[in-house]
Image (spheres, rainbow, N blue to C red):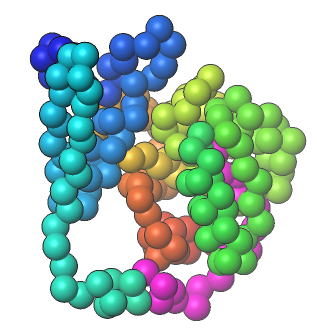
Amino acid sequence: MSPETMSKIFDPFFTTKEYGRGLGLSTIMGILRAHHGTIKVYSEVGKGTTFKLFFPTTTDIHEKQQEVEDTTPWKGKGLILLADDEPVVLQVTAKMLEKLGLDVITAKDGREALQLFEKYQKELSAVILDITMPHLDGIDTARIIRSKLPDLPIFLSSGFSKHSVNKNDVDFFIQGFLSKPYNINTIIKSLKKYF
């Protein structure tokens, strides 16, 4: 990469491709910062690029794993609409919600989420929407859902921190924000007051 390109690679929406959203590296940077890590990049035009990811060391790995697996006995009941364009996030989050006793319908983008919303809106208990999705982002999807069902709990999620989300874009009330990567305990804390 040229020095000019390299100076922009972590900027949200920067891309060198004709089509693309340019969110990959900025999302990775957000996740690394959430874990108090960093990334170093070395690149030479015509030779290649090396990325090195650094995470803080810890001596209590076993305790941390136990903490993630140790869930409270809370169980929910109802139907959740979950939308995320990352297949792994969609699958893992759906399994966590099902483990908590909830039924889940999933969508891979905002358009599909709205189609499912139209079909199941009378049965829905809550909606969880990733902010950055193709075709229709989570904020616009949430705004449409909120206009039709003002009392339906809506949660937004993102690999960026809550503080990096433009508050002017979210001009309506949401019940919570799930900062990726989140675990089952985070989901319980967010959802249990609405079920």
Q: Quadrant of residue 23?
A: top left
Magenta highlight on residue 82: yes
Q: Nearer the viewer, residue 168 or 27?
A: 27
Q: Residue furthest right?
A: 119
Magenta highlight on residue 94: no
Q: Is residue 80 left or right of residue 191?
A: right
Q: Is residue 29 above or below residue 61?
A: above
Residue at 29% from the left image edge and 46% from the top image edge: 30
Residue at 41% from the left image edge and 55% from the top image edge: 180
Q: Quadrant of the N terminus?
A: top left
Residue at 71% from the left image edge and 43% from the top image edge: 107
Q: Is residue 166 left or right of residue 92?
A: left
Q: Nearer the viewer, residue 70 or 15?
A: 15
Residues drawn in magenta: 68-83
Q: Nearer the viewer, residue 147 or 78?
A: 78
Expressed as whole percent of the image width and height from the top left, the position of residue 193 reads 53, 72
Residue 167 visible here: no
Q: Is residue 186 above or below residue 106?
A: below
Q: Is residue 39 above or below residue 25?
A: below
Q: Quadrant of residue 150?
A: top right
Expressed as whole percent of the image width and height from the top left, the position of residue 120 reads 84, 48
